[in-house]
Image (tube, rainbow, N blue to C red):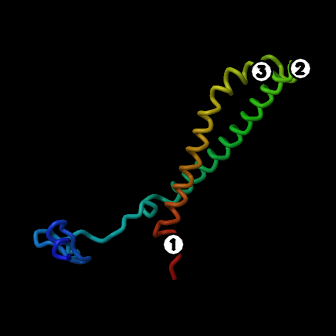
């Protein structure tokens, strides 16, 4: 059974290599076993600025998205109840022509900031430079 797996499918045990394969054997002729860490290569100030930019963008887009949702709700309430005194006509037109069409793209911006911040945080937490060593 092992012979069939080796001959037909080319399967090998861990650590075995075919004769024609080149296997690096250390620093003299092979690949160096160095892990490149982008967080060590970038200046600390750049990482802090990028982190602050993502957090500020996430905060502002969240506030804008919630505010837009409240404005759309007020406009819908005014139309459903027939109360034309709830919102001035200019504000009603602004909500209908500007806020409502940009509501979904605003959500995409919010999700973009959120996802980018999450990926950045996970990547920086897994960085060798941010791991605790004694």
Horizontal side of 41 relative to 52 (left or right) equals: left
- Mark 3 Cα within 10 Å, few/some/many (few <14, many 20+)? many
Residue of label 1: 131
The number of numbered badges drawn on the structure is 3
Q: Position of residue 92 (x, y in %)?
A: 77, 21
Question: Which circle's residue, 1 or 3, is located before the other in the chain?
Answer: 3
Look at 17% across and 72% down and name the residue there: 4
Look at 67% across and 24% down and name the residue there: 98
Q: Secondary structure at mark 3?
A: helix
Q: Nearer the viewer, residue 81 or 93?
A: 81
Residue of label 3: 92
Question: What is the C-alpha distance between the residues marked 3 and 2?
Answer: 11 Å
Seen in the picture, residue 51 relative to 127 is either above or below; the reply is above
Q: Position of residue 18 (x, y in %)?
A: 14, 72
Question: Which circle's residue, 3 or 2, is located before the other in the chain?
Answer: 2
Q: Quadrant of the N terminus?
A: bottom left
User: Which dot, 2 or 1, sits closer to the camera?
Assistant: 2
Q: Secondary structure at mark 2?
A: loop
Q: Position of residue 99 (x, y in %)?
A: 68, 27
Q: Residue furthest bottom?
A: 134
User: Which dot, 1 or 3, sits closer to the camera?
Assistant: 3
Q: Are marks 2 and 1 in contact (CB under 8 Å)?
A: no
- Mark 1 Cα within 10 Å, few/some/many (few <14, many 20+)? few
Question: What is the C-alpha distance between the residues marked 1 and 3?
Answer: 53 Å
Residue of label 2: 85
């Amino acid at each position: 059974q092992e012979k069939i797996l080796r001959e037909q499918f080319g399967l090998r045990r861990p650590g075995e290599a075919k004769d024609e394969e080149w296997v690096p054997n250390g620093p003299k002729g092979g690949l160096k076993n160095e892990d490149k860490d982008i967080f060590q290569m970038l200046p600390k100030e750049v990482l802090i600025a990028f982190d602050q930019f993502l957090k500020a963008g996430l905060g502002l887009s969240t506030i804008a998205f919630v505010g837009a949702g409240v404005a759309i709700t007020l406009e819908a309430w005014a139309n459903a109840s027939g109360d034309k005194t709830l919102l001035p006509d200019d504000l009603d037109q602004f909500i209908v022509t500007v806020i409502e069409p940009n509501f979904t793209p605003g959500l995409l911006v919010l999700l973009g900031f959120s996802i980018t911040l999450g990926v950045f945080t996970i990547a920086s937490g897994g960085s060798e430079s941010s791991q605790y060593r004694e």
